[in-house]
């Protein structure tokens, strides 16, 4: 599937492909592209399958999501690029490097879903199975488990374009909920085992110890094979809760 993309920044700069997380969309990277990275790079951000303005049809496997990204880059005439992935996007970058390492120059994975327990995968899948609409954006923010002490108004500012308002005044996220459930199911299986073959290019692992998604055991397994590990404060939404630390670390890393 060719995905719908947005581009920002220097059209003649090195391409940086930014992959959003579950329930997000390409607009998640607009602020950092316009304020920071766009002065150096050509920023390309797709809506993943089942999200935003891209197609919603199955299959919703991680392998299919990686194939969609490669097909989209082929359509854009991009052979190699830097990759930045957040959460689900970070998992997809790990999967993509293992299969298409020759397409990657440098990679930054932020709060990647390397693997979660079956119990947590079930919990989140059940939340999404019965979700999709909320009384208001404020009600959506209140239902999240990854915002920590971020100011609600800051979190709301990052949700522009994620929702549509229904006739009854409720809001609906612009996603296919069946796809979201399938994504959480696959999170119960591990990402490719870290090795020189599965991580063949310089890679930055950035995560929030306070949130705990990346476990100490996972960090220990990946640290010998990545170029750099950066810890940031805040919670899972690091582009909101640790914007300066996250954007600066990735920019410095991609510039080499």
Image (cartoon, rainbow, N blue to C red):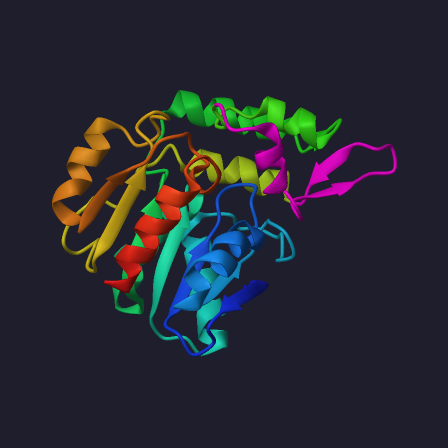
Q: Is residue 131 above or below residue 255?
A: above
Residue 47 on image: x %, y %: 56, 55
Left or right: residue 158 versus residue 199 is right
State which quarter of the image contains the C terminus.
bottom left
Left or right: residue 34 versus residue 228 is right
> Is residue 154 rendered magenta in the image?
yes
Which residue appears farthest toward the right when viewing the image? Answer: 167
Look at 67% across and 45% down and name the residue there.
174
In this view, the residue in front, 114 or 162, is 162
Look at 12% across and 44% down and name the residue there.
224
Look at 14% across and 54% down and name the residue there.
196
Look at 34% across and 36% down and name the residue there.
189
Residue 24 on image: x %, y %: 56, 45
Residue 23 on image: x %, y %: 56, 41
State which quarter of the image contains the N terminus.
bottom right
Q: Is residue 27 above or below residue 142?
A: below
Left or right: residue 108 versus residue 34 is left
In this view, the residue in front, 6 or 242, is 242
In the figure, residue 17 lies in which quadrant?
Answer: bottom left
In this view, the residue in front, 183 or 172, is 172
Q: How many marks?
A: 0
> Is residue 207 rendered magenta in the image?
no
- What residue range appears in magenta? 149-174
Q: Evaluate whether residue 49 shows in this view.
A: no
Residue 133 on image: x %, y %: 71, 32
Q: Evaluate whether residue 204 shows in this view.
A: yes
């Amino acid at each position: 599937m060719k995905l719908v993309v947005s581009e920002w920044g220097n059209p003649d700069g090195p391409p940086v492909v930014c992959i959003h997380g579950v329930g997000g969309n390409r607009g998640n990277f607009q602020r950092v592209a316009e304020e920071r990275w766009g002065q150096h790079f050509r920023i390309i951000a797709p809506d993943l399958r089942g999200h935003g303005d891209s197609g919603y049809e199955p299959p919703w496997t991680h392998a299919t999501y990686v194939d969609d990204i490669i097909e989209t880059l082929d359509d854009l005439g991009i052979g190699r690029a830097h990759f930045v992935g957040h959460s689900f996007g970070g998992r997809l970058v790990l999967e993509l490097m293992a299969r298409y390492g020759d397409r990657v120059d440098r990679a930054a994975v932020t709060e990647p879903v390397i693997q979660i327990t079956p119990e947590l995968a079930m919990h989140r899948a059940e939340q999404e199975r019965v979700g999709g609409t909320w009384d208001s954006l404020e009600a959506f923010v209140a239902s999240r488990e990854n915002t920590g002490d971020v100011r609600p108004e800051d979190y709301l500012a990052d949700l522009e374009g994620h929702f549509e308002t229904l006739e009854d005044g409720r809001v609906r996220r612009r996603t296919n909920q069946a796809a979201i459930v399938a994504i959480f199911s696959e999170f119960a299986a591990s990402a490719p085992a870290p090795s020189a073959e599965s991580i063949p290019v310089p890679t930055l692992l950035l995560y929030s110890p306070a949130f705990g998604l990346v476990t100490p055991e996972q960090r220990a397994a990946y640290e010998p094979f990545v170029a750099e590990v950066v810890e940031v404060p805040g919670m899972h939404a690091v582009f909101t809760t640790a914007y300066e630390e996250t954007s600066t670390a990735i920019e410095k890393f991609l510039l080499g």
